Amino acid sequence: GQNIDQPTEMTATEGAIVQINCTYQTSGFNGLFWYQQHAGEAPTFLSYNVLDGLEEKGRFSSFLSRSKGYSYLLLKELQMKDSASYLCAVNEGDYKLSFGAGTTVTVRA
Amino acid sequence: IAGITQAPTSQILAAGRRMTLRCTQDMRHNAMYWYRQDLGLGLRLIHYSNTAGTTGKGEVPDGYSVSRANTDDFPLTLASAVPSQTSVYFCASSEGGGGANVLTFGAGSRLTVL
């Protein structure tokens, strides 16, 4: 089985920084993904971590600690278009990617 | 434009009816997946296929069946729809099933079973 937890909602101001935490307990681990999903649209890939540490991609960074079963997604210099749901997902192996329920981020002017 | 096409976009269905959601990809990806997305529960894997001719069960397979006759198509069938199958269904694909394989999702099919 799998258990992937992330906060339901977060609100932040334009230009600020927001950190979305994700903790997981899964039967296997073959990497952790973050996806972005705007309302009414399909999820799109943001980042992938398989080794401990920080991966940076422009305004977005993702961190992984395998020993703690913990990841976070850091969104810097928030823009209105960053208002979306952010999905944490663990590759458990055997073609099984398990998702958390998602964190809805609202960016306010 | 390369990607995944799902049909229908939206459908209202009477309970007990049979329904097939269609999914076609043109990226020659080996693996394909069907997820359902429900409020508060996130995306849950229904069935997957790692290559043409093979399929596997995900987390919530009951009441659904799939087939993979070729690389491009991966239809999902509800043999006798029930209201609990009201959901948004996403088809996805990836080059393989290994750790770094990124899923590409279709736009989704919103199904309402009355």
Image: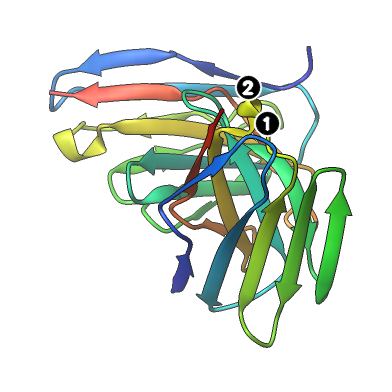
Instruction: Note whether B14 is above or below B97 in the view shown.
Output: above
CB atoms at circles 1 and 2 under 8 Å apart? Answer: no
Q: Is residue A94 above or below residue A99?
A: below
* Residue at horizontal 65 percent and vertical 68 percent from the top: A71
Q: Percent from the top left, x then y, of residue A56? A: 86, 55
Q: Amino acid at mark 1?
A: Gln
Q: Secondary structure at mark 2?
A: strand
Label 1 to label 2: alpha-carbon separation: 34 Å
Residue picked out by circle 1 = A79
The picture places residue A27, in percent across and down from the top left corner, at: 54, 79
Q: Quadrant of residue A77?
A: top right
Q: Residue furthest bottom?
A: A67
In which quadrant of the rendered view does residue B63 lie?
top left
Name the residue carrying label 2. B24
Quadrant in the picture for the C terminus of chain B: top left
Res. B102 in view: no
- At a point 75% along the width and 66% down the height, the residue shown is A63
Compared across the picture, whether B107 is left or right of B19 comes to right
- Sort mark 1 into few (<14), some (14-19) or many (20+) by Cα contacts within 10 Å: some
Chain of the residue that carries numbered disc 2 in the rendered image: B
